[in-house]
Image: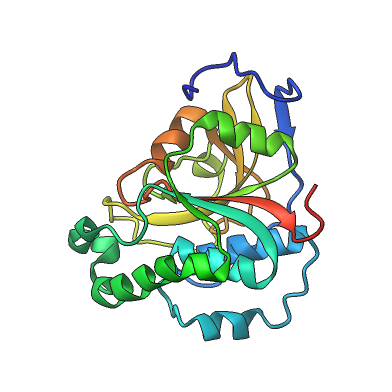
Amino acid sequence: MNADDTNVQLDDQSLDHVVDVPHEIQLYTWDCGLACVKMVLKHYSVNMGNFLQVCKELQFGESVWTIDLANILALYRVEHHFYTVTLGVDKGYSGKAFYRAKFSSDETRVNNLFQDAQYKGIPVSKGTIDADAILNHLTQNKVLIVLTDWNILKCLHCDKSCTPSLHCFGSLIKTYQGHFIVVVGFNLKQKLIYYKNPAYDKEMCCCTMKNFEKARKSYGTDEDIIFVYGLENSVS
């Protein structure tokens, strides 16, 4: 589906759909992905009393990749599927400012996580996801964790009326800046995507479908996207 196409054939023919998900604000400049996972866990009423310990045991420190989020979801027995165009680390990222500082150590660690995913029962597939699949997933009251380029993603409300509760990145940095969001809904008539942005205290953000597609497919994201289905043994 083209992001500008309003003639999408959805399962329930819905033109407007939003999944109610609790909001969570990130605590630091680097933990947007963790905040997104917390939103998902809260949505399913999962006890997160040991969340800090789980993160400590996974040893990702302050460099959180999408495969780390998939591992956390698996440990909390949340059914999900991680799609990416790169199974491992793209060596081209070594020259990107966003990745450069920890690239050497991250490359080995992240590649090992991808190799171990199959044995841990973490579903990871290589491929690009079209907008149809995202919208259909949302109509089933399921959400997605999506890696975007912060410098491209533009909320139609927040970017005009408020400032981030936490500045994730330097305002003068214009190169790729990875940022995780939780996608919770859409409006086909207005061509909008609704999402939760952990960098803002605003409950709901929205952007155009065209902007969303550009932000999630920017070089640096690997088009990483996690489809969340629900708790194991209770997935409908």
Residue drawn at x 28%, y 56% is 173
Seen from the viewer's position, the closer of residues 76 and 24 is 76
Count of numbered badges drawn on the protein: 0
Q: Position of residue 73 (x, y in %)?
A: 62, 66
Query: In front: 212, or 13?
Result: 13
Q: Is residue 61 left or right of residue 137?
A: left
Q: Is residue 228 visible?
A: yes
160 left or right, relative to 18 = left
Res 147 visible: no
Residue in the image at 72% along x and 34% along y = 139
Q: Viewer-proximal residue, 164 or 135?
A: 135
- State how the image is colored: rainbow
Residue at x 40% of width, y 68% of height = 115
**Residue at the farthest left position:** 95
Q: Position of residue 44 (x, y in %)?
A: 78, 60
Say above or below: 188 vs 64: above
